[in-house]
Amino acid sequence: KMAEKAHEGAFSEAEKAARAERRKIKEQHKKVVGWQEYALQRSSFVKFMMGHMEKAGCPVDPKEFFVVRHCAENVGGGFDAEASKQGGIVLCQNHIRDYEHAELTLTHELIHSFDHCRAYVDWSNCVHHACSEVRAANLSGDCSMFQEFNRGHMNFKGQGQECVRRRATLSVSMNPSCSAPGQAAAAVDTAFKRCYADTAPFDRAP
């Protein structure tokens, strides 16, 4: 009987842990959905990009275009080119830290969406992918002085371009088609000059 009680106790503790984890996931989801909805209504960057998606001929239904879910990858979000004709954006509820992170991630991924809309992008082509990553890192605020300071990068001279190269190379290297040693960096080098100068739909880098 003591063994049975111990077994029941262990089961009870496991069930409590499972319930706590389910509750945590549900709360994460609700919180990130709230940040996403607030950004769609109030963020000047997100609203600007959504407006230019429509002008480019790719209006989207936010209820279908944006998805908040748990992600296995250690990223804040991503652009899914296969989700629909216009693609789709994922926010990773288990990696989004706060509203500012959600807004930055949405802006970054909307730049990929804009590129997908305005031009033929073969996401398995490393140079195509690198071009969009250079633009997203440059235009989303991902390489602002504030973001770089928080990452511990404080070499102010040339830091912006250095950050864009580093962030773009990291993102491209996660593409299975571009994961060979040196392949992502070479693609970023090839794309960098032209794509860093391309600030559409902004008049200049924000």
Image: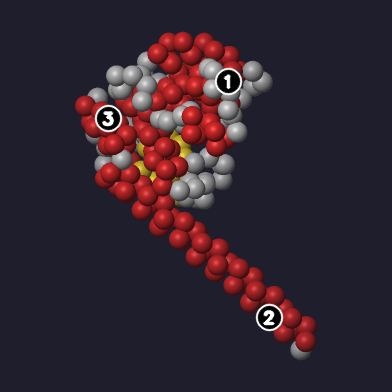
Mark 3: amino acid: Met
Q: Residue at (31%, 40%) from the top-left corner?
A: 43
Would you place residue 67 above or below residue 138 in this image? below
Q: Residue at (64%, 18%) from the top-left corner?
A: 182
For disc 3, the neighbor class at 10 Å (few under 14, some 14 to 19, many from 20) is: many
Label located before the other in sequence (2 or 1): 2
Mark 1 secondary-structure assignment: helix
Label located before the other in sequence (3 or 2): 2
The spot of residue 48 in percent (x, y) is 27, 32
Mark 2 secondary-structure assignment: helix
Q: Residue at (48%, 14%) from the top-left corner?
A: 192
Q: Is residue 184 left or right of residue 56?
A: right
Quarter of the image with the N terminus is bottom right
The spot of residue 121 in percent (x, y) is 40, 21
Q: Name the residue furthest bottom.
A: 1
Mark 2: amino acid: Glu
For disc 2, the neighbor class at 10 Å (few under 14, some 14 to 19, many from 20) is: few
**Mark in front: 2 vs 1:** 1
Q: In this view, does 65 lie to the left or right of 174?
A: left
Marks 3 and 2, how far apart in space? 56 Å
Query: Where is mark 1, residue-wise?
Result: 184
Between 135 and 174, which is closer to the camera in this rendering? 135
Would you place residue 115 above or below residue 61 in this image? above
Query: Where is mark 2, residue-wise?
Result: 8
Quarter of the image with the C terminus is top left
Marks 1 and 3, how far apart in space? 27 Å
Asked if residue 143 shows in the view, the reply is: yes
The disc placed on residue 24 is none
Query: Where is mark 3, residue-wise?
Result: 53
Would you place residue 98 above or below residue 190 in this image? below
Q: Is residue 94 left or right of residue 199?
A: right
For disc 1, the neighbor class at 10 Å (few under 14, some 14 to 19, many from 20) is: many
